[in-house]
Image: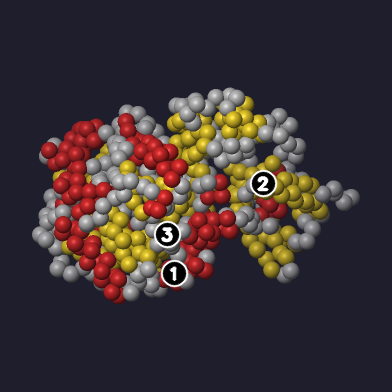
Amino acid sequence: MITSVLVANRGEIACRVFRTCRELGVRTVAVHSDADANALHARVADASVRLPGEAPADTYLRGDLVVKAALAAGADAVHPGYGFLSENADFARAVLDAGLTWIGPPPEAIEAMASKTRAKQLMGIEPLTEVTEADLPVLVKAAAGGGGRGMRVVRRLADLDAELAAARAEAASAFGDGEVFVEPYVEHGRHVEVQILADTHGTVWPLGTRDCSLQRRHQKVVEEAPAPGLSAELQEELSALAVRAARAVDYVGAGTVEFLVAGGRAHFLEMNTRLQVEHPVTEAVFGLDLVAEQLRIAEGHPLDTDPPRARGHAVEARLYAEDPAHDWSPQTGRLHRLDLPDGIRLDTGYTDGDDIGVHYDPMLAKAVAHAPTRAEAVRKLASALERAAIHGPVTNRDLLVRSLRHPEFTAARMDTGFYDRHLADLTEPSPDPHAPLAAALADAHARSRPGFGGWRNVPSQPQTKRYATAGEEHEVHYRHTRTGLEADGVRVVHADAHLVVLETDGVQRTFEVTRYGDQVYVNSTALRALPRFPDPTAQHAPGSLLAPMPGTVVRVAEGLTPGTPVKAGDPLLWLEAMKMQHKITAPATGTLSELHAVPGQQVEPGELLAVVTETS
């Protein structure tokens, strides 16, 4: 019987596994890098072991250090989570060779399916070896790992070599394996997958379908179970193919078989030999704890002959610290508050006051809603996210709410090109027009001196405050009167430092106001208080390329030096942040007049990288 589990992972998945272990009375052991020394997963475990360093290659990808940590902490089993070493057959063997229980499939099954090229061959599918114009568009894909890393869509043959190089570098950084392959890219397909669970006694459960079509950069954003709108015949075919894939490699444990569905046909993508990020929607629909089932299977217990029956519908949204309106750039900083309404499952690796760094994935949390019908689950999740208090770095929360309410999604007509078509509309700024006024009134009350009512016998001059939100500036005016605060066009029903009630056309609305320095949050609207007079020194020369995010300069375009002519859109350098590489391109056609970035350099947002002088 398992008594102590080390989770060879971090963040949300480590916390999620620990939660089940505590419920089962199993001790927990965490591993943490130096960057994660104070991370939530390290704090909530019964014991934690340091992995010296910060980069994944030096810490969470070091299987030898993880096994030593398990032995040192007295763990008798290892759960790999997802990502990192979760689909590494050599790591699984090392765990077993050390006399520990491996909570996962046999190393041979991982080996057969962990490489997407070998998995496709096992299913009778060959990757492209030579790409021609007739094959375009194609998808460059990492052979190991997942999560959208090491994945690129190529629509021009001239771009193939550069995208292959970028994919190899990203895959090597994320998974320790730079192997990539090329396959046809299926346009306008739906990403549908089947959860399976298999024991050591020959039973394989296909646990329904999930739709994961809403993706950015080939990484899932919204997932749901069951996948809507599939015919009964197609559902049976998908389940049969998933069971066939599992039986082909004598699979054991939890796994997922992924497909692209287009034109009523299923195209096999891969089999993930691990727990998926989106597993909670399957748990909600089938009333299961998949982690508990993983532990039971690892202990040798058999599954029942038939799986449980599905009930209702579940939807999951991934909350990322990123700015969708600016090329999905990852964001860092202090997470002051993360709070969702009751009735929503929240899986997270962060809590109030934690810092979000640059080293790992930008996912903050997963929010999951379950209801009797799809429409009810979608409505419930959208409302909860809209009402959530998320104070800290910019997130994709508004994008999620709009996505869930988009008619294409509510009608279940989405596909993997959803954000390619709708991103501009989904990220159009639409701040609450009364939020800046509420912030100003709360600030005016907070700054008022005790015993001073703020009014005079003569009318006071209007006070002015300026705020920025979503790239726009807002100026509001108010004044002090004998009866309190007053503003044009609205009636101030109540105002204190944290709560403002405004009435417009007979309708009252309540605004909760929270401040962290110059950052102000009014309900779900984030504002930044601006100084009365802008700083004249905060200017950059035209054509300046500023770092859009914190990260590391991983490479500069070959032969790029000051004086080099460039064309608008030419890639100049690449930044790596949160396990993804981001291309920085020339803003105009002209000459590179300054180059400040060098490979290996750590940069902060707004730091000057280069200057392009535009051709007159």
According to the picture, the residue beneath numbered tag 2 turns out to be 468
SS under mark 1? loop
Q: In this view, does 199 lie above or below 448?
A: below
In the picture as drawn, the residue positioned furthest to the right comes out as: 458
Q: Is residue 25 visible?
A: no
- Residue 412, which numbered label? 1
The quadrant of the image that shows the C terminus is: top right
**Residue 104 vs residue 500, the one in the foreground:** 104
Q: How far apart are marks 1 and 2 (CA)?
A: 36 Å
In the picture as drawn, the residue positioned furthest to the bottom comes out as: 232
* Colour mode of the rendering: secondary structure
Q: Are marks 1 and 2 in contact (CB under 8 Å)?
A: no
Q: In this view, does 342 lie above or below 274?
A: below
Q: Which x, y percent locates residue 382?
A: 49, 63
**Residue 337 vs residue 394, the one in the foreground:** 394
Count of residue discs? 3
According to the picture, the residue beneath numbered tag 3 turns out to be 187
Task: First in sequence, mark 1 or 2: give its number.
Answer: 1
Q: Is residue 314 left or right of residue 485?
A: left
Name the residue rendered at 13%, 50% in the picture: 1
Q: Which x, y percent locates residue 159?
A: 45, 42
- Which residue type does callout 1 highlight? Ala
Task: First in sequence, mark 3 or 1: give its number.
Answer: 3
Q: How far apart are marks 3 and 1 (CA)?
A: 17 Å
Query: Alpha-carbon neighbours of circle 3 within 10 Å: few (<14), some, or many (≥20)?
Result: few
Name the residue rendered at 59%, 37% in the picture: 567
